Image: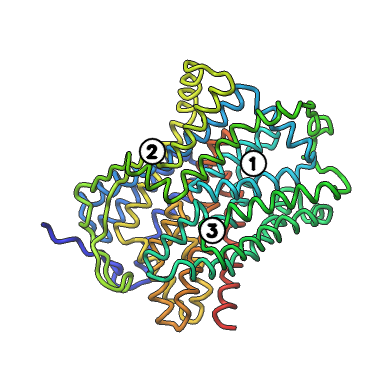
Amino acid sequence: MLTPWPQSYLPLGTLLPSALVAAVPVIVLLALLGVWHVRAHLAAVAGLAAAVAVAVLVAGMPTPLALAAVTHGALYGLFPIGWIVLNALFVFAITVHTGMFDVVRDSVVSIAEDRRIQLLLIAFCFGAFVEGAAGFGTPVAISAAMLIGLGFKPLPAAGLSLIGNTAPVAFGALGTPIIALAGVTQLPVNELSAMVGRQLPLFAILIPFWLIWVMAGWRSIREVWPACLVVGVSFGATQFYVSQHYGPTLVDISASLVSIASLLLLLRVWRPRTVWRFPGETPRAAADATPHRTAHVLRAWMPWGILSVLLFLWGLPDMKAWLNAQSLFTFPVPFLHQAVLRTPPVVAIAKAEDAIFTLNWLSASGTALLLTGVLSGALLGMGPRALLRTYWETLLKVRLSLLTIAAMMALGFVTRYGGLDATIGLAFARTGVLFAFFSPLLGWLGVALTGSDTSSNVLFGNLQQISAQQVGVSPLLAAAANSSGGVMGKMIDAQSIVVAGVATGQHGQVGDILRYVFWHSLALACLVGVEIFVMAHW
């Protein structure tokens, strides 16, 4: 057996220049997307090339290991991430092809013509439910596509869906990020759940107001503040209660259902003084909703009902275990599995990194989405040929986006296995008394790099714990802060932005979406930092 290659966290001798060079791939990617408006798949490939160059030429990573990391990341980008994107859009395409989405749109408009209320209902409440059941990009794809169908313009639909999908992320996919964080830190999962549940409710209350401000401006908030408050408080209070008493698994699902019910109850006794529409939009354009029989409306919502039930079932531990027993295949990645050694101070004890590709084709969330599409299409009268044609058209639509996701995830994997992420993380950890402020920003960076709060927790959870002990901060607080800060990075990670772009037909405008959300993401992450600093020192 070959001796694992030990990662070098100070390849240039000192931390600051090493961290600056380690950040080059991310800088290249963001600059190409956000400044020079390069198409997403080309920017992703360029960022990946920069990551390989820095890992091999600066960090000393052997070339075979770097290429194996590229392969591992690209495969992960296609499955499970690309699998989710493809099948989520397949479900949406079926509702459009059968005309059922028009009925869904009309039913939402009949609840509220006001665009602000529609935004709260879809991007915040319903998106949180999908996040709680599935996560991994699914809520952004579905929420953005639904907003487009309601008449939102593509860029706001994408950007607002990304901003709305923040508060629930730490407890997404039935608590997977918290469970993963407990696994790497060996901290009790229920204590981590409770700590995150104390950190995020404030932002659950803030995000609805933030959404309205971004879309309609500060003055508009005065007319819909009761809706924002009811949605935020009902979500945040339920999130707090369930996370304190029942652990992380059902936090989002419970909070989203309570917030949806609370908003619908409020609308029975209260409405905004005026109906807000987009500039230049006529009343008829926003309210031209055809009345439908109740049975027809229920039939139109059936695919989304099936989706919710299947995603929930797929997320249950017992169900997932049974499905994996029928279909799980794991493959150690050649040349990479246990060939990279993570060393202190990033980990307490030197450890060879696993590199195992998991093909859980039956238990993957994307498979639940595919089954949703097939069942919904059949129940709505589509034959096998029509279903296959719709699936093929969807695949053609997302082919460049799948390439983009594969390249961006490959970039993240090279960064991880090359130790570049740890170098950047150590720079954050060397901030002394300000560590409590920068702790959630490290989680934010982790999600921006990996595309997942789960991955960020696995990546930096142990580093947070070790650094907190060195500076006299509660390790439980710092570990939880990694997850809480990470939720704000979800709106700028490459995977989410590409998913939002695909769902809204803006593959070539990914840079525009990034610019739309970047400063919101950074501002909210800094607010989390302020909160954690206060919790640590007062």
* Above or below 112: residue 431: below
First-in-chain label (1 vs 2): 1
* Above or below 499: residue 173: below
- Please name which of the two marks, 1 or 3, marks the residue nearer to the observer: 3
Cα–Cα gap, marks 2 and 3: 28 Å
Tell me the crowding category of disc 2: few under 14, some 14 to 19, or many 20 or more residues within 10 angstroms, Cα based.
some
Give, as a three-letter code, the residue at label 3.
Val
Give, as a three-letter code, the residue at label 1.
Ala
Viewport quadrant of the N terminus: bottom left
Q: Which residue is mark 3?
A: 487
Q: Residue at x 50, y 46 (%)?
A: 134
Q: Residue at x 20, y 47 (%)?
A: 334
* Above or below 299: residue 260: below
- Place of residue 436 in the rendered image (x, y in percent of width and height, measured from the top left): 51, 75
- Place of residue 150 in the rendered image (x, y in percent of width and height, measured from the top left): 70, 34
Q: Which residue is mark 1?
A: 157
430, 207: nearer the viewer: 207
28, 300: nearer the viewer: 300
Cα–Cα gap, marks 1 and 2: 31 Å
Cα–Cα gap, marks 1 and 3: 19 Å
Q: Residue at x 61, y 40 (%)?
A: 144
First-in-chain label (2 vs 3): 2
Give, as a three-letter code, the residue at label 2.
Leu
Q: Which residue is mark 2?
A: 362
Which of the 4 image quarters holds residue 197? bottom right
Residue 36 visible in the picture: no
- Place of residue 253 in the rendered image (x, y in percent of width and height, measured from the top left): 58, 52
Q: Is residue 486 left or right of residue 14?
A: right
